[in-house]
């Protein structure tokens, strides 16, 4: 009759209990953002404790997010309709990637239009971008995508020790990538290549784009690493079965996504020079 | 048609739920969240509408300035002295009002109001017990609150609220960087609102794609669900682009980057391209759910099924696709190459085709129907006619030569208010009157409703019709002062505003009064439409019980396209 019959076979399969976490998480984000804003303008708005408010807000945000995650993990343990849930979560993740892709797409769009269709977007001649450390980091990140995929397969086949090894390898490669990127940032900043350096104002647009694209990507790498570490911990706690391990799927998809974005960034910014 | 017998209901699992304020804070029920969206939109609507009032009354009585202009003509004051007024606190406050009126109306009223009906009605319509991700649904709602706090709070910080228009074009929006936080608060509010939009959109996409009940195939999906589904795709694809644009602005203001600041190698016109790549589709985010609701209301009170179901769905999809291909028609005066102007002009005309298909399908739905002029029906018919007027203004503005003349005049303001107030807000009123008996079990007063519809319709017609004329004569928008010859026209516009404001107050009072009345719409189908409409929400009690249905919805899914049609 219908392709989605399974959902209604269990009449109470979709009866979620109330949750305090969405409102608590929003409130914490509020505190973090208001604290940051007050801090940025040195307003002393929170009785001269602006930076304290900011850090408390960030801490509370992470805490409430974990509380939310904990409630979801607990609920899943008692839920019945596995297929429905997996298909919902997969579609959610794909849609989330669409929005991420559009955000990155805007940055790429800005880059290509500025670099190839308008004036005033000057690439510095005297500053060397990339080189072999970036090339090696790129190869390592691509490798980590493969190890991550094999880790996912290992979880699917219930080979726990293999999955552990591959996950830890992926995490290590990710950290090496972040280290390489941080090192490159450091070297570039020493050479005066940073947005807001008014002595090199002619490079400002290019350096802004360079830092926002690689930086936004770096934030994604860090998020992906956090996800992979959580996945590893949950695997050690025995949360996954061969059929039920959506966190592994999501983390590995996310990692592939981050990898693909990096390859595109690498080609655009380091390789394709006008 | 679903012919299986419903399976036996299992006993309701024991779920601890809170009451009172704790219930509001912790609920994940799509119906309660829908009501929370509704109340937020209603209260913010009064505030945003009040700001429109402040704008209108400034423009009705810019007396001091007219005297000043006369003084310039008489030679007793220099034009520099008078020009200085435009940058004084008065002029600045006026610009804050226009900026925040627009931002609040878009992000805190129209989008949440449609989110309210989508949340309440769509899961029931598709036979689901709740949204796919109920907690995420609550989160998407709560994210609106920081956005509202940031926008409203920005009036009280140093330098006041953002005053660079809701479009926040640089370099104007780069003014006061590092000193006045108003614009930065606006940017962060857009981030919060955008996050809310994206998460809500993903939730609707997954819900409608995955949670449809037995027999509810895509070809049988009610039009509101289709409209919300396609709107969600637009939101999902557009909002990240807006987020990136305002983030560039935030970085340029605070962290020394040079994306958009021309003095640092940035490209301010590229901001306009990125901004409108989101914001043209955003106008469809604000009208397409309304098109869906309109189809239900017009069909219901014509005692017919909707005419041209398939064409309606195809037209919504076509509008969504074309919507991403026409953004630069807002920028004909920035000096684009002629071929680009020509392309965006013709592509913008193209939107008229699917829109026309929808309008004619609605007219064909009315044709030969047994029409009942209830309040929702009056609002719906009014909305169609006002939206058509707005559409014609849009054709004139999409034409490059006339747009160059009319750009940034009140003609533009009149045009988009016809579509957003005459269209979206009228449809929100219609939907409120239509679904309120289902949502609360209480009818809103019908007599007051008809008076309200008249005030709204004629108020909108007068206010924004006059604006077209004022604009064609050359009055610039976003300026709190004008030449004396526009005085009478501005008085007429303010009169129109007052009429529609009275209409809005009537709705608000009706809603409050209804809450104190006994439940008088206790039947499942208070409008007596469901023999023909066969929609799930009219087959369950008013208001619906928690979790909507015990097993499967109590009536079969019907074909949207009757045989032999
Ligand atoms: Cu447009």
Image (cartoon, coloured by chain):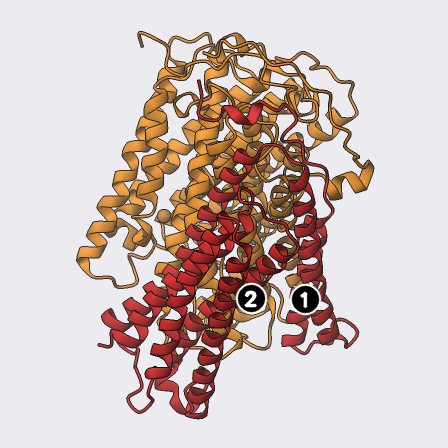
Chain colours: A red, B orange
Q: Quadrant of residue A110?
A: bottom left
Q: Please indicate whether residue A85 sits to the left or right of residue A150 in the image.
A: right
Q: The disc numbered 1 marks a residue on which chain? A: A
B60 or B226: which is nearer to us? Answer: B226
State the quadrant of the C terminus of chain B: top left
Q: Is residue B461 visible?
A: no
Query: Residue tagged by mark 2?
Result: B183
Q: The disc numbered 2 marks a residue on which chain? A: B
Dot 2 falls on a residue whose secondary structure is helix
B333 or A111: which is nearer to us? Answer: A111
Number of numbered callouts drawn: 2
Dot 1 falls on a residue whose secondary structure is helix
Q: Quadrant of residue B171?
A: bottom left
Give x and y (percent) for residue B210.
49, 32
Q: Which of the two discs, 2 and 1, sits closer to the camera?
A: 1
**Residue at position x 53%, y 70% in the image:** B87
For residue A58, the mark is 1
Task: Answer whether labels 2 and 1 touch (C-beta < 8 Å).
Answer: no
């Amino acid at each position: 009759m219908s392709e989605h019959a399974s959902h209604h076979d269990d009449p109470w399969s979709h009866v979620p209990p109330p949750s305090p976490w969405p409102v608590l998480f929003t409130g914490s984000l509020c505190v973090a953002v208001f604290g940051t804003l007050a801090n940025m303008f040195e307003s002393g708005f929170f009785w001269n404790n602006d930076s304290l408010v900011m850090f408390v807000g960030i801490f509370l945000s992470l805490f409430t997010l974990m509380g939310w995650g904990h409630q979801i993990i607990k609920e899943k343990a008692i839920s019945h309709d596995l297929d429905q849930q997996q298909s919902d979560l997969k579609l959610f993740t794909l849609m989330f990637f669409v929005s991420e892709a559009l955000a990155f797409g805007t940055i790429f769009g800005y880059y290509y239009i500025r670099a190839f269709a308008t004036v005033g977007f000057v690439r510095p001649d005297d500053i060397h971008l990339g080189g072999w450390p970036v090339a090696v980091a790129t190869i390592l990140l691509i490798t980590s995508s493969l190890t991550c995929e094999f880790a996912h397969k290992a979880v699917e086949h219930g080979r726990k020790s293999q999955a552990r090894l591959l996950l830890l390898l992926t995490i290590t490669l990710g950290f090496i990538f972040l280290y390489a990127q941080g090192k490159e940032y450091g070297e570039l900043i020493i050479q005066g290549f940073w947005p807001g350096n008014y002595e090199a104002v002619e490079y400002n647009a290019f350096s802004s784009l360079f830092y926002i694209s690689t930086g936004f990507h770096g934030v994604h790498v860090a998020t992906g690493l956090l996800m992979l570490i959580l996945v590893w911990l949950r695997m050690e706690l025995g949360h996954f079965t061969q059929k039920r391990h959506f966190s592994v799927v999501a983390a590995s998809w996310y990692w592939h996504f981050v990898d693909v974005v990096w390859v595109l960034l690498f080609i655009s910014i380091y390789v394709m020079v006008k | 048609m679903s012919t299986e017998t419903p399976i036996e209901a299992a006993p309701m699992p024991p779920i601890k739920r809170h009451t009172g304020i704790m219930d509001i804070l912790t609920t994940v029920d799509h119906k309660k969240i829908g009501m929370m969206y509704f109340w937020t939109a209603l209260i913010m609507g009064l505030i945003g509408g009040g700001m429109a009032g402040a704008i209108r009354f400034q423009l009705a009585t810019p007396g001091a300035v007219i005297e000043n202009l006369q003084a310039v003509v008489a030679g007793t004051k220099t034009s520099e002295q008078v020009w200085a007024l435009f940058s004084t606190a008065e002029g600045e406050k006026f610009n804050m009002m226009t900026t925040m009126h627009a931002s609040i109306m878009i992000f805190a009223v129209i989008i949440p109001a449609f989110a309210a009906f989508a949340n309440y009605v769509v899961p029931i319509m598709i036979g689901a017990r709740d949204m796919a991700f109920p907690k995420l649904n609550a989160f998407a709602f709560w994210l609106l609150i920081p956005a509202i706090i940031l926008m409203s709070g920005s009036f009280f910080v140093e330098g006041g609220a953002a005053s660079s228009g809701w479009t926040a074009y640089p370099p104007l929006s780069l003014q006061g960087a590092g000193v006045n936080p108003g614009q930065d608060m606006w940017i962060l509010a857009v981030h919060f609102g955008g996050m809310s939009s994206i998460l809500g959109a993903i939730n609707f996409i997954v819900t409608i794609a995955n949670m449809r009940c037995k027999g509810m195939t895509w070809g049988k999906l009610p039009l509101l669900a289709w409209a919300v589904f396609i709107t969600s795709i637009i939101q999902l694809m557009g909002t990240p682009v807006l987020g990136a644009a305002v983030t560039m602005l935030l970085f340029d203001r605070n962290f020394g980057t040079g994306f958009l600041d021309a003095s640092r190698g940035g490209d301010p016109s590229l901001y306009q391209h990125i901004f409108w790549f989101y914001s043209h589709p955003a106008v469809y985010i604000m009208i397409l759910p309304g098109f869906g609701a309109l189809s239900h209301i017009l069909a219901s009170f014509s005692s017919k099924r909707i005419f041209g179901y398939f064409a309606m769905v195809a037209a919504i999809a076509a509008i969504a696709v074309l919507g991403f291909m026409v953004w630069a028609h807002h920028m004909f005066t920035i000096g684009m190459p002629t071929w680009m102007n020509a392309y965006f002009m013709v592509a913008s005309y193209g939107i008229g085709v699917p829109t026309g298909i929808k309008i004619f399908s609605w007219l064909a739905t009315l044709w030969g129907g047994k029409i009942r002029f209830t309040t929702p029906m009056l609002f719906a018919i009014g909305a169609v006619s006002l939206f058509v007027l707005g559409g014609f203004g849009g054709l004139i503005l999409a034409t490059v030569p006339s747009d160059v003349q009319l750009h940034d005049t009140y003609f533009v303001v009149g045009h988009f208010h016809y579509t957003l107030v005459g269209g979206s807000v009228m449809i929100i009123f219609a939907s409120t009157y239509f679904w309120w008996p289902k949502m609360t079990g209480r009818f809103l007063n019908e007599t007051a409703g008809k008076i309200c519809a008249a005030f709204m319709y004629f108020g909108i017609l007068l206010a924004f019709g006059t604006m077209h004329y004022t604009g064609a004569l050359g009055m610039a928008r976003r300026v709190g002062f004008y030449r004396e010859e526009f005085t009478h026209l501005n008085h007429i516009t303010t009169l129109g505003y007052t009429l529609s404001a009275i209409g809005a107050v009537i709705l608000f009072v009706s809603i409050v009064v209804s809450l104190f009345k006994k439940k008088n719409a206790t039947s499942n189908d208070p409008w007596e439409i469901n023999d023909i409409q066969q929609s799930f929400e009219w087959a369950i009690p008013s208001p619906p019980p928690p979790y909507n249905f015990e097993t499967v919805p109590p009536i079969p899914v019907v074909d949207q396209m009757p045989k032999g049609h």
